[in-house]
Image (cartoon, rainbow, N blue to C red):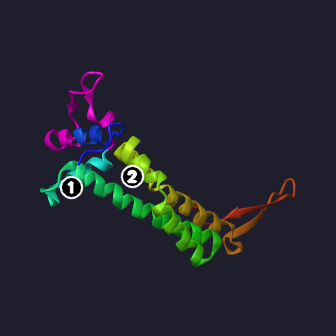
Amino acid sequence: MYPAQTSLIPASVALVRFIEVNGFDGNYPYWYLGTTPVKYLIGPVVPSILVGLHKLLPNFSFFDLSYLVILTSYFIFAIGWGLLGYKLSKNKNIGYFVGVLSLFLPWHWVTALTISELSTAVASSLTPWVLLAFVVGMRSVSHPKNRSTVVDSESGSQYSVSLKPAL
């Protein structure tokens, strides 16, 4: 099964096939700008995942494995948004609602399968986890137990200083 004509998944699959055979340090000869180092065309994370999955599941094509990676990343996406909704509201029902809603809303499915590139689809699914780390870090810093007051000897001003790093 091939993706839509506007999708950039075939470009990722072509690069992953090249990386599987020639490694990550070679020049890709079929790029529209001439020969270009592969490391400038795609990052190492998604090709490593796809090559590893292809070694584990050799009967599946890179297209099938890319759909599997997108599907898995969107389950991680929905879990992340659900946890973020729970952390912000402190209500499990809202967390479940946000997680299920973000899983079934069609906008990210349409963008991932029709107009996006595989690395972008996987990276965008990690957005709620970055926001969750920020929220948890900010709450640990703003907790009164984790703060100390420092007095400036010259001006007599008081400053509240965190004892723990934010993340």
Between residues 28 and 154, which one lies in front from this camera angle?
Answer: 28
Residue hosting label 1: 52
- Residue 164 pos. (x, y %): 60, 66
Residue 151 vs residue 87, the one in the foreground: 87
From the viewer's perspective, is residue 42 above or below residue 84? above
Camera-side residue: 30 or 70? 70
Q: Residue at x 22, y 27 (%)?
A: 30
Q: Using the rendered image of the protein, determine whether residue 92 is visible from the camera's viewpoint.
A: yes
Q: Residue at image x 66%, y 71%?
A: 146
Q: Characterize the local packing of mark 1: few (<14), some (14-19) or many (20 or more) Cα atoms within 10 angstroms.
A: few
The number of numbered badges drawn on the structure is 2
Which amino acid, mark 2?
Val
141 within the magenta span: no
Image height check: is 33 above or below 51? above
Any mark on residue 139, and which?
none
Q: Residue at x 25, y 45 (%)?
A: 2
Q: Is residue 1 left or right of residue 121?
A: left
Q: Which residues are magenta?
A: 16-43
Return the residue at label 2. Answer: 122
